Image (cartoon, rainbow, N blue to C red):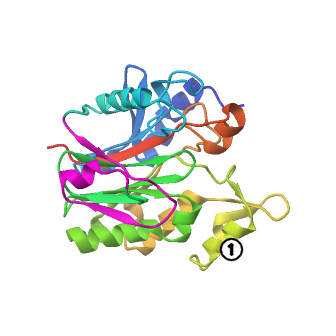
Amino acid sequence: MSMPIETIIDSLEEKTLSDSGFYWRAQSGVRALVCRELESAGFLNAFSTRLGGVSPFPKNSMNLAGFDDDTAENIAENRRRFLSALGLSPESVLLATAWQVHGDRVKIIRTRDEALDGNGKFDALASKMENVFVGVKTADCVPVLIGDPESKSFAAVHAGWRGTSLSIVKKAVRVLEKEFNALAESIIAAIGPAAGPQKYEVGPEVIESLSRTISDIGPFIRPSRSGHSTINLPAINQAQLIDAGLQEKKIFTAPFCTMTQSDLFFSYRVDRKAFGRTGRLLSIIGKAG
């Protein structure tokens, strides 16, 4: 059984959450996790929870994507509530997302039309446009939000094990450097709620794939049952960000596991078993004009 939501929130409301660089933003039952350092640098950012919505997952869930498992009306209302909790409205900003395929392509958004087109196959989005918020959808995979205060550019990254094995966060940093003259040493990154190292078990094919990218995979895995290991995917992405030139002190990791705390977050592995379907979290970053 997952811990009660109130217990999760109360236990992490104080020192642990603050020390990790995050705080809760709440309105009308909606809760979102905000990286304080990104916000202080001028980037409005948030990692959603499953609380305060209208979707039947199983009830009152904040499903923000997944049109095959939910109605367009529910998702639109949930997105309105999520943006409203951040002081935004669908009428005042553009929410840019993509068709995520567990790859390593980064979409560069420079125009309104590019922001509105969500049909391209990408797993990261980058921009510096005001009132455009780039977002990635997750339900156990690792969401990473990146902002450079110098160039005012930003990116959202979806890093599952496949994207991580392709070093997608490093490629997102390189795109910000190349396209927007970002400085890696000034970039701030927030790694959001994802399946954690105690619960995220994978088979040998995943370890083999990651080993092609990571020279020493040992510190990030722990053998579990025969032929399997649990893996710390958020820590691997942190290491890749450091390898891309970010300062460790400017990388913040949320202290939540989506599988352990599935009452608070959507978890593909937990929800599919319990309900036969799952919703999607949304992690967004941008600059309001």
Identify which residue is drawn at 62% across, 51% down. Answer: 196
User: Magenta includes 96?
Assistant: yes
Residue where numbered disc 1 is placed: 208
Image quadrant in which you'd find residue 87:
top left
**Residue 257 screen position, x and y as percent:** 59, 44
**Residue 252 screen position, x and y as percent:** 43, 54
Q: In the depicted view, which residue is nearer to us: 243 or 283?
A: 283
Identify which residue is drawn at 58% across, 62% down. Answer: 161
Identify which residue is drawn at 25% across, 55% down. Answer: 114
**Magenta span covers which residues?**
92-119
**Residue 255 screen position, x and y as percent:** 53, 45
| Viewport quadrant of the N terminus | top right
Q: In the depicted view, which residue is nearer to us: 185 or 140?
A: 140
User: Magenta includes 263?
Assistant: no
**Amino acid at dot 1:** Glu
Query: Is residue 251 visible to us here?
Result: yes
Query: Is residue 241 visible to us here?
Result: no
Identify which residue is drawn at 48% across, 40% down. Answer: 281
Image quadrant in which you'd find residue 270:
top right
Residue with the most extreme right position: 226
Secondary structure category for the residue under label 1: helix
Q: Is residue 47 left or right of residue 59?
A: left
Q: In the depicted view, which residue is nearer to us: 2 or 251?
A: 2
Residue with the most extreme left position: 289
| In the depicted structure, whether residue 87 falls above or below residue 54 | below
Q: How many marks?
A: 1
| In the depicted structure, whether residue 137 falls above or below residue 266 | below
**Residue 210 screen position, x and y as percent:** 61, 71
| Viewport quadrant of the C terminus | top left
